[in-house]
Amino acid sequence: MFDPIKAIIDFTAHASVSADPEAKGGINGAVGFLKDLFEKEMGLDVKVVETPGHPVVIAKRGGDPAWPHVVVYGHYDVQPADPLEEWHTPPFEALVKGDEMFGRGVADDKGPVMVHIAALARLLERRSDLPLRVTFIVEGEEEIGSVNLAAVMRAHKAELSGDFLLMSDTTGLGRDDESITTGLRGISALEVRLQGPRQDLHSGFHGGAVMNPVRALVALCASLHDADGRVNIPGFYDDVVAPQDWEREEMDRLGRDPEDYRKLLGVPELCPPPDFDVFESRCFGPTLEFNGISGGYQGHGSKTIIPAKASAKISCRLVPNQDSFRILDLLEKTLRERCPKGVTMEIERHHGGDPYLVLPPHKSGEDADTAKGRAFKAADEAIREQFGSAPHYLREGGSVPILSDIRRILGLDALMLSVALQDCNMHSPNEKLDLIVFERCSKVSERILEAVADGV
């Protein structure tokens, strides 16, 4: 009998940090683990597709071409475990404490993808003749922008085309409050570097004669928002699609208290832009954030210099109908136009991805008598049974940039079942997975797959 808890523990033991060139052993270990799991334990046909980066694992349960075909997406790569001294347990030795499991990747995304692996394994134990085709596509570069997955999907389009996508790389509300994610924000990111003098200068000898790059950078960054916190880039909001009334009603149904949220974050005051309240601003509105800024002396005491250079990392979270490349163009144009005199500018574009929105059939008026429609109906019913209340249909503020490519290349809409919770410490020390939510979601996934197979 398939043991998903043991499987997650074994999976987590492989330090598959995609951003670390020294983690090749962990990457290979995770790929080998998945290959053995799919082939030896589940009897699926497995293909390991090499890329210029990390491999993609494609595991398929075939069958009659007339059967419905569900594609399941996940990723085996994880974030670095640093800072190690803040972990209470070894990050790559998953440990169960009561109803929680701790370890790097247990919530993002090794535990969540195991929800659907366990669901299919248990379903096939009961019904080996299940009339359903299922293909898992598990990549190793999600945490670094999924740079090679689009090419893999194009090369394997025929075998990856299906009825809908099932995935769980989003976050839920709580143990007894499940959500189905209907939208994710896109992202555009870049780094701007300003160069002043060819080397650091004595601020007494040369101060007043030259532009300080830190001063120029601060002024430039400050110009990108107005006094109300709106992004001050011409054209930035032109394509934004406002949320529908039912989406705002779903948000209101949560009944969350802004003061509790403020205390949770430990900030003196919350500062949403004028168009949205605190919680709406996290998913309905686009943003521009400074992720890091550097320049000048950072050591103890003072060093009276005019720095030679300064830089800032900037990212924008985008909402439907914004285009990530257009936003990068607008941002770069604005930065160049506002660059202060006395410094030169260099801009390096980083990763990007378009926003994603999928409306459940009962909200969009779409035909519900399809594999996708039956999946959403089964998810709604199973969540009510497993969690004791109706699911929330919510957009989320984070990004899964590859989803727009999946829709564009494979034509698949996604049903996003939330497994990790908002307090799971994703990307942080002491990452954790709620095992009660895991088990409930596994049963929901099993119900989805069976309903699609049976056409009910």
Image: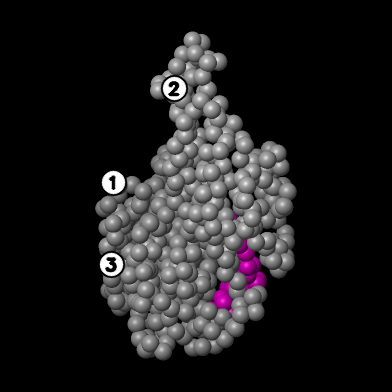
Tell me residue 297's x, y (percent): 46, 23
**Image height check: is 132 above or below 295?**
below
Residue occupied by mark 2: 197
Query: For the residue marked with disc 2, what is the amino acid?
Result: Pro
Residue occupied by mark 1: 22
Query: For the residue marked with disc 1, what is the amino acid?
Result: Glu
**Image height check: is 396 above or below 407?**
above
Labels 1 & 2 near each other (Cβ < 8 A): no
Residue occupied by mark 3: 48
Query: For the residue marked with disc 3, what is the amino acid?
Result: Val
- Can the viewer see residue 260? no
- Asked if the stretch drawn in magenta spans residue 393, the answer is yes
Q: Is residue 221 left or right of residue 38?
A: right
- Can the viewer see residue 242? yes
User: In the image, which residues are magenta?
Assistant: 375-397
Q: How is the image coloured?
A: one colour
Task: From the image, state whether disc 3 or disc 2 is nearer to you.
Answer: 2
Q: Residue at x 64, y 41 (%)?
A: 225
- For label 2, the SS is loop
Location of the C terminus (image quadrant): bottom right
Q: Residue at x 40, y 46 (%)?
A: 81
Label 1 vs 3, first from the N-terminus: 1
Labels 1 & 3 near each other (Cβ < 8 A): no
- For label 1, the SS is loop
In the depicted view, which residue is nearer to us: 5 or 288? 288
Q: Is residue 126 left or right of residue 284?
A: left
